[in-house]
Image: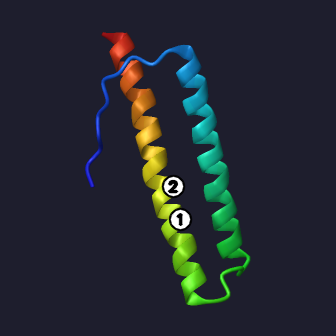
Amino acid sequence: MGRIVFHVCINENMKDIISELISRVNETKKEIADAVAAGSANTFEVYQRLVGRNEGLTIALQILEDLMAGDEEQEEQ
């Protein structure tokens, strides 16, 4: 899947919100990784669900980071 480039102007309030979302997504990804490492996935179905959630969060994180990067590129121009 290719990266999406956003060309939007984000105000400081939105940057704060996006930064908070990035932080929370990273925290949740860490919790999932810790759960898998601790053996909390007692069935293959639970394991698949955790991996799927992690993949979805990875995609969401990339979108949020692209938004922030796109705004920084816009400011440089």
Locate residue 11 relative to residue 4 in the image: left or right: right
* Along the line of sight, the residue nearer the viewer: 4 or 17: 17
SS class, disc 1:
helix
Left or right of 48? Residue 69 is left
Q: Quadrant of residue 10?
A: top left
Q: Amino acid at mark 1?
A: Arg
Q: What residue appears at the point 40 percent right and 21 percent down from the top-left corner?
A: 71
Looking at this view, name the residue that lies furthest to the bottom: 43
Q: Is residue 52 above or below residue 67?
A: below
Q: Judging from the image, what secondary structure is the residue with disc 2 in?
A: helix
Residue 53 badge = 1
- Under mark 2, the amino acid is Leu
Position of residue 17 relative to residue 29, above or below, is above
Instruction: Please rate how many residues cluster around mark 1, counting C-alpha atoms within 10 Å: few if below 14, some from 14 to 19, many from 20.
Output: some
Asked whether the residues under the numbered discs 2 and 1 touch, taking CB atoms below 8 Å apart as contact, a structural biologist would say: yes
Q: Which residue is found at the position 68% from the left and 87% from the top? A: 42
The percent coordinates of residue 73 (x first, y second) are: 35, 20
Q: Position of residue 36 (x, y in %)?
A: 65, 74
* Residue designated by label 2: 57
In the rendered image, the quadrant that contains the C terminus is top left
Q: CA distance from mark 2 to mark 1?
A: 6 Å
Pinpoint residue 33: horizontal percent, then vertical percent: 64, 66
Colour style of the rendered protein structure = rainbow
**In the rendered image of this protein, does residue 67 appear above or below residue 76?**
below
Q: Quadrant of residue 66?
A: top left
Query: Picture coordinates of residue 2 (x, y %)?
Result: 26, 49
Q: Quadrant of residue 22?
A: top right
Residue at 59% x, 29% y: name it: 17
The quadrant of the picture occupied by the N terminus is bottom left
Q: Is residue 77 left or right of residue 25?
A: left
Q: Would you call the spot at circle 2 few (<14 residues within 10 Å), some (14-19), or many (20 or more)? A: some
